[in-house]
Protein backbone atom coordinates (compact mmCIF):
# COMPACT_ATOMS: atom_id res chain seq x y z
CA UNK A 1 0.00 0.00 0.00
CA UNK A 2 1.37 3.41 -0.89
CA UNK A 3 2.10 5.53 2.14
CA UNK A 4 1.92 9.24 2.98
CA UNK A 5 5.39 9.92 1.56
CA UNK A 6 4.34 8.71 -1.88
CA UNK A 7 1.18 10.81 -1.60
CA UNK A 8 3.11 13.95 -0.74
CA UNK A 9 5.76 13.35 -3.42
CA UNK A 10 3.01 13.07 -6.02
CA UNK A 11 0.87 15.90 -4.71
CA UNK A 12 3.74 18.39 -4.37
CA UNK A 13 4.31 18.94 -8.11
CA UNK A 14 0.58 19.38 -8.58
CA UNK A 15 0.45 21.91 -5.76
CA UNK A 16 3.40 23.82 -7.17
CA UNK A 17 1.76 23.94 -10.57
CA UNK A 18 -1.59 25.05 -9.19
CA UNK A 19 -0.17 27.56 -6.74
CA UNK A 20 1.66 29.21 -9.60
CA UNK A 21 -1.60 30.63 -10.87
CA UNK A 22 -2.64 34.15 -9.99
CA UNK A 23 -3.67 34.39 -6.34
CA UNK A 24 -4.62 38.04 -6.28
CA UNK A 25 -7.65 39.85 -7.58
CA UNK A 26 -9.06 38.56 -10.85
CA UNK A 27 -8.45 40.86 -13.79
CA UNK A 28 -11.49 40.99 -16.04
CA UNK A 29 -11.41 42.24 -19.60
CA UNK A 30 -13.26 45.26 -20.89
CA UNK A 31 -15.21 45.77 -24.08
CA UNK A 32 -16.31 42.14 -24.42
CA UNK A 33 -19.85 41.21 -25.41
CA UNK A 34 -22.31 39.73 -22.92
CA UNK A 35 -21.54 36.08 -23.69
CA UNK A 36 -17.77 36.57 -23.49
CA UNK A 37 -18.20 38.44 -20.22
CA UNK A 38 -20.35 35.60 -18.85
CA UNK A 39 -17.71 33.03 -19.82
CA UNK A 40 -15.04 35.20 -18.23
CA UNK A 41 -17.02 35.22 -15.01
CA UNK A 42 -17.40 31.43 -14.92
CA UNK A 43 -13.71 31.02 -15.79
CA UNK A 44 -12.75 33.13 -12.76
CA UNK A 45 -14.13 30.34 -10.59
CA UNK A 46 -13.50 27.22 -12.66
CA UNK A 47 -9.92 27.98 -13.72
CA UNK A 48 -8.64 29.15 -10.33
CA UNK A 49 -7.50 26.29 -8.07
CA UNK A 50 -8.14 28.50 -5.04
CA UNK A 51 -11.86 28.34 -5.76
CA UNK A 52 -12.20 25.16 -7.82
CA UNK A 53 -10.56 22.74 -5.36
CA UNK A 54 -12.62 23.81 -2.32
CA UNK A 55 -15.78 23.59 -4.41
CA UNK A 56 -14.91 20.09 -5.63
CA UNK A 57 -14.14 19.07 -2.04
CA UNK A 58 -17.53 20.35 -0.91
CA UNK A 59 -19.26 18.52 -3.77
CA UNK A 60 -17.70 15.22 -2.75
CA UNK A 61 -18.67 15.74 0.87
CA UNK A 62 -22.27 16.56 -0.05
CA UNK A 63 -22.58 13.36 -2.07
CA UNK A 64 -21.01 11.34 0.74
CA UNK A 65 -23.66 12.89 3.00
CA UNK A 66 -26.59 12.05 0.70
CA UNK A 67 -26.97 11.10 -2.94
CA UNK A 68 -29.08 14.26 -3.37
CA UNK A 69 -26.84 16.26 -1.07
CA UNK A 70 -26.07 18.98 -3.62
CA UNK A 71 -29.75 19.67 -4.23
CA UNK A 72 -30.53 19.72 -0.52
CA UNK A 73 -27.65 22.08 0.28
CA UNK A 74 -28.05 24.34 -2.76
CA UNK A 75 -30.41 26.89 -1.10
CA UNK A 76 -27.78 27.48 1.61
CA UNK A 77 -25.06 27.57 -1.03
CA UNK A 78 -26.90 30.18 -3.08
CA UNK A 79 -27.64 32.30 0.00
CA UNK A 80 -23.92 32.20 0.80
CA UNK A 81 -23.11 33.31 -2.75
CA UNK A 82 -25.37 36.32 -2.32
CA UNK A 83 -23.80 37.16 1.05
CA UNK A 84 -20.31 36.83 -0.41
CA UNK A 85 -21.27 39.06 -3.33
CA UNK A 86 -22.43 41.79 -0.92
CA UNK A 87 -19.40 41.54 1.37
CA UNK A 88 -16.70 41.10 -1.29
CA UNK A 89 -15.59 44.77 -1.55
CA UNK A 90 -14.49 44.68 2.09
CA UNK A 91 -12.08 41.72 1.88
CA UNK A 92 -8.34 41.75 1.31
CA UNK A 93 -5.64 39.45 0.01
CA UNK A 94 -6.03 37.19 3.06
CA UNK A 95 -9.09 35.60 1.47
CA UNK A 96 -6.99 33.46 -0.91
CA UNK A 97 -5.03 31.54 1.75
CA UNK A 98 -8.13 31.40 3.95
CA UNK A 99 -10.15 29.82 1.14
CA UNK A 100 -7.61 27.11 0.39
CA UNK A 101 -7.30 26.29 4.12
CA UNK A 102 -11.09 26.02 4.27
CA UNK A 103 -11.06 23.76 1.23
CA UNK A 104 -8.45 21.53 2.86
CA UNK A 105 -10.58 21.30 6.00
CA UNK A 106 -13.65 20.31 3.95
CA UNK A 107 -11.65 17.64 2.10
CA UNK A 108 -10.23 16.29 5.37
CA UNK A 109 -13.73 15.97 6.83
CA UNK A 110 -14.91 14.23 3.67
CA UNK A 111 -11.98 11.82 3.84
CA UNK A 112 -12.06 11.00 7.54
CA UNK A 113 -15.66 11.08 8.73
CA UNK A 114 -17.61 7.90 7.95
CA UNK A 115 -20.91 9.79 8.10
CA UNK A 116 -21.98 13.39 7.67
CA UNK A 117 -24.88 15.37 9.11
CA UNK A 118 -27.16 18.05 7.75
CA UNK A 119 -25.80 20.80 10.06
CA UNK A 120 -22.27 19.98 8.93
CA UNK A 121 -23.20 19.97 5.24
CA UNK A 122 -25.13 23.25 5.48
CA UNK A 123 -22.40 24.99 7.50
CA UNK A 124 -19.71 23.98 5.02
CA UNK A 125 -21.89 24.97 2.07
CA UNK A 126 -22.34 28.40 3.63
CA UNK A 127 -18.61 28.80 4.26
CA UNK A 128 -17.41 27.60 0.85
CA UNK A 129 -20.20 29.43 -0.98
CA UNK A 130 -19.37 32.75 0.64
CA UNK A 131 -15.63 32.23 0.28
CA UNK A 132 -15.92 31.47 -3.42
CA UNK A 133 -17.65 34.78 -4.09
CA UNK A 134 -15.34 36.75 -1.78
CA UNK A 135 -12.27 35.42 -3.57
CA UNK A 136 -13.67 35.72 -7.10
CA UNK A 137 -14.63 39.37 -6.53
CA UNK A 138 -11.72 40.33 -4.27
CA UNK A 139 -10.20 43.64 -5.32
CA UNK A 140 -13.32 44.87 -7.12
CA UNK A 141 -15.87 47.40 -5.89
CA UNK A 142 -19.54 46.57 -5.54
CA UNK A 143 -21.18 46.35 -8.99
CA UNK A 144 -17.91 47.51 -10.55
CA UNK A 145 -18.08 44.63 -13.01
CA UNK A 146 -20.72 44.10 -15.67
CA UNK A 147 -23.87 42.07 -14.98
CA UNK A 148 -22.83 39.16 -17.28
CA UNK A 149 -19.55 38.77 -15.37
CA UNK A 150 -21.42 38.65 -12.07
CA UNK A 151 -23.87 36.10 -13.47
CA UNK A 152 -20.98 34.01 -14.76
CA UNK A 153 -19.35 33.98 -11.34
CA UNK A 154 -22.62 32.89 -9.70
CA UNK A 155 -23.10 30.09 -12.24
CA UNK A 156 -19.47 28.98 -12.05
CA UNK A 157 -19.58 28.88 -8.25
CA UNK A 158 -22.61 26.56 -8.24
CA UNK A 159 -21.36 24.48 -11.18
CA UNK A 160 -18.00 23.79 -9.51
CA UNK A 161 -19.73 22.27 -6.48
CA UNK A 162 -22.20 20.42 -8.71
CA UNK A 163 -19.30 18.94 -10.69
CA UNK A 164 -17.73 17.44 -7.57
CA UNK A 165 -21.11 16.17 -6.39
CA UNK A 166 -21.93 14.75 -9.82
CA UNK A 167 -18.63 12.88 -10.09
CA UNK A 168 -19.24 11.44 -6.65
CA UNK A 169 -22.79 10.37 -7.45
CA UNK A 170 -21.76 8.65 -10.68
CA UNK A 171 -19.11 6.73 -8.74
CA UNK A 172 -21.63 5.66 -6.12
CA UNK A 173 -24.15 4.54 -8.73
CA UNK A 174 -21.75 2.76 -11.09
CA UNK A 175 -19.53 0.95 -8.57
CA UNK A 176 -20.29 -1.35 -5.63
CA UNK A 177 -21.30 0.83 -2.69
CA UNK A 178 -18.52 -0.02 -0.18
CA UNK A 179 -15.73 0.41 -2.70
CA UNK A 180 -17.16 3.54 -4.28
CA UNK A 181 -17.48 5.35 -0.95
CA UNK A 182 -13.94 4.37 -0.07
CA UNK A 183 -12.77 5.66 -3.44
CA UNK A 184 -14.47 9.01 -2.88
CA UNK A 185 -12.85 9.35 0.52
CA UNK A 186 -9.46 8.59 -1.04
CA UNK A 187 -10.11 11.25 -3.69
CA UNK A 188 -10.99 13.68 -0.90
CA UNK A 189 -7.71 12.87 0.84
CA UNK A 190 -5.82 13.76 -2.34
CA UNK A 191 -7.67 17.05 -2.57
CA UNK A 192 -6.81 17.70 1.07
CA UNK A 193 -3.10 16.99 0.49
CA UNK A 194 -2.90 19.26 -2.54
CA UNK A 195 -4.72 22.09 -0.79
CA UNK A 196 -2.60 21.81 2.35
CA UNK A 197 0.56 22.09 0.24
CA UNK A 198 -0.89 25.05 -1.62
CA UNK A 199 -1.80 26.72 1.66
CA UNK A 200 1.73 26.21 2.95
CA UNK A 201 3.21 27.73 -0.20
CA UNK A 202 0.84 30.71 -0.14
CA UNK A 203 1.40 31.42 3.53
CA UNK A 204 5.16 31.05 3.19
CA UNK A 205 5.13 33.43 0.22
Image (cartoon, helix red, strand yellow):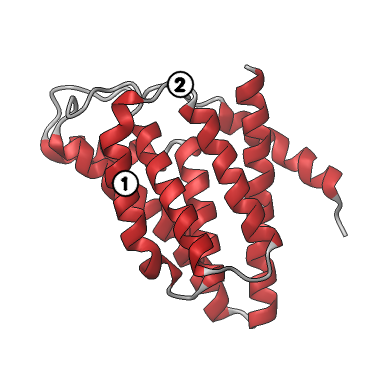
The quadrant in which residue 78 appears is bottom left
Horizontally, residue 112 falls left or right of residue 125, namely right
Residue 55 image position (x, y, % from top left): 47, 49
Q: Nearer the viewer, residue 20 or 195?
A: 195
- Towards the viewer: 192 or 47: 192
Q: Which residue is mark 2?
A: 93
Other-residue count near label 1 (Cα within 10 Å), few / some / many at <14 / 14–19 / ≥20: many
* Relative side of 13 to 4, left or right: left
Give the quadrant of the N terminus. Answer: bottom right
Number of callouts? 2
Determine whether, in the image, residue 158 is placed left or right of residue 203: left
Give the residue pinned by disc 1: 81
Marks 1 and 2 sit apart, C-alpha to C-alpha, by 19 Å
Seen from the viewer's position, the closer of residues 145 and 124 is 124
Pick whichever, 20 or 99, lies toward us: 99
In the visual, does 56 lie left or right of 190?
A: left
In the picture shown, does residue 20 fall above or below 101? above
Q: Position of residue 56 (x, y in %)?
A: 50, 53
Identify the residue shown where x is 54% and y is 70%.
Answer: 65
Res 68 quadrant in image? bottom left
Residue 8 vs 26, above or below: the answer is below
Circle 1 sits in a helix, a strand or a loop, which is it?
helix
Please report whichever mark, 1 or 2, sits nearer to the chain's N-terminal start: 1
Q: Are there few (<14), some (14-19), or many (20+) residues within 10 Å of tag 2?
A: few
Residue at the bottom extreme, as displayed: 176
Q: Residue furthest top?
A: 205
Is residue 27 placed above or below 135 in the rendered structure?
above
Q: Say which mark, if any, is on residue 3.
A: none
The part of the image, by quadrant, that contains residue 136 is top left
Q: Which quarter shows the C terminus?
A: top right
The x and y percentages for residue 146 are 15, 31
Q: Residue at x 16, y 41 (%)?
A: 35
Amino acid sequence: MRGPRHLLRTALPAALLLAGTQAGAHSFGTGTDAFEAFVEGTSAVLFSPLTLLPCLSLGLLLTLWQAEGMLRAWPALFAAHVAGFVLAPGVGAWVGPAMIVLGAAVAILAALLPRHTRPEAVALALAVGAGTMLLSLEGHGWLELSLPIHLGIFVGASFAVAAGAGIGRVALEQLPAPWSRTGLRIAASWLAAIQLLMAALLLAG
